């Protein structure tokens, strides 16, 4: 089975998991994840509803990140490399985000065709397209979506998958180094940005990992280059591990709490 076929299977299964997650939570409402039994004290109805809503919302976000991962793999298949952080002009100035480049691979080719790719994201023409943001970039019930901003972003900086305009990173290169399952593709960012703007989470190997999360209680979502998605708690160990996972060629082993 090819990696692309596996990704398609992952995305299909995740859609089913959304429904199963909601059903399972009705049967098991304990916060520790164990099935409720006759010895459990009565649970407040509002808390139970909140738990179901949070779990379903997170499952939808996981599926969105898997859709983005699949789109990146399809882009890679078509272009022979990962997308760059932005569409650049002839002088190297970033104009539009990688999110615009992925539109044809997210069944949004009609929207893609409406962009003036030689103009910046906030040109008179392109800024009118902000309100057409696909739901895959942020949960529809979030402030980010209402403001036409992306919550799911790339790490941009030296050594990352989205290093810069001169990078032509391939899946083969990652596989020969850290491996796709140990290299970060996308993150749940702490601060959303206009979805067409070439702006993401800045990464510097010499500094602490930028703050992540904000859409999920108790943790944040990370998308990996193999198409999988993890929900991680903000522990010290995870911060150290993700700092290593942000760089595709450091060959440093790490373990994650919760993966």
Image (cartoon, rainbow, N blue to C red):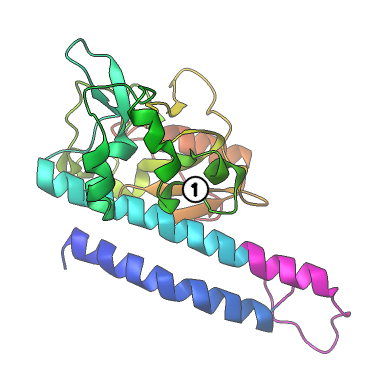
Q: Is residue 121 above or below residue 29?
A: above
Find residue 87 and report its horizontal and vertical position in percent.
24, 27
Q: Report the side of 114 relative to 136 (left or right).
A: left
Comparing 137 with 170, the one in front is 137
* Chief secondary structure of the magenta portion: loop
Q: Nearer the viewer, residue 13 or 238?
A: 13
For label 1, count other residues whose C-alpha is less than 10 Å away and answer few (under 14), some (14-19) or many (20+): many
> Residue 63 sits in which quadrant?
bottom left
Q: Height in image: 164 above or below 35?
A: above
Residue 40 percent across, percent down from the top left: 84, 81
In this picture, is 60 found above or below 115?
Answer: below
Look at the image and say whether residue 191 sits in the magenta stretch.
Answer: no
Judged from this view, the residue extending furthest toward the bottom is 38
214 left or right of 80? Answer: right
Question: Which secondary structure lies at badge 1?
Answer: loop
Residue depicted at x 67% and y 81%: 26
Identify the residue shown where x is 25% and y is 42%: 112
Q: Which residues are magenta?
A: 29-54
* Whether residue 163 can be seen here: no
Where residue 50 sits, quadrant-wise, is: bottom right
Residue occupied by mark 1: 138
């Amino acid at each position: 089975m090819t990696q692309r076929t596996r990704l398609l299977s992952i995305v299909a299964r995740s859609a089913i998991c959304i429904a199963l997650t909601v059903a399972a939570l009705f049967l098991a409402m304990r916060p520790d994840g164990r099935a409720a039994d006759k010895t459990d004290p009565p649970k407040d109805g509002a808390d139970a509803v909140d738990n179901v809503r949070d779990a379903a919302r997170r499952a939808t976000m996981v599926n969105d990140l898997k859709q983005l991962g699949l789109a990146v793999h399809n882009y890679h298949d078509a272009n022979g490399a990962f997308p760059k952080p932005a569409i650049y002009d002839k002088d190297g100035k970033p104009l539009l985000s990688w999110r615009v480049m992925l539109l044809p691979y997210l069944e949004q080719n009609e929207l893609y065709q409406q962009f003036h790719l030689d103009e910046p994201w906030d040109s008179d023409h392109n800024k009118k397209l902000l309100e057409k943001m696909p739901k895959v970039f942020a949960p529809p019930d979030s402030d980010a979506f209402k403001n036409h901003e992306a919550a799911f972003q790339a790490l941009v900086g030296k050594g990352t998958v989205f290093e810069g305009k001169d990078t032509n990173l391939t899946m083969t290169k990652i596989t020969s180094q850290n491996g796709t399952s140990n290299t970060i593709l996308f993150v749940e960012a702490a601060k959303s940005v206009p979805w067409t703007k070439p702006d993401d989470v800045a990464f510097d190997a010499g500094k602490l990992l930028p703050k992540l999360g904000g859409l999920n209680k108790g943790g944040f979502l990370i998308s990996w280059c193999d198409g999988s998605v993890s929900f991680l708690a903000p522990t010290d160990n995870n911060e150290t591990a993700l700092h290593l996972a942000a760089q595709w060629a450091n060959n440093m082993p790490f373990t994650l709490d919760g993966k």
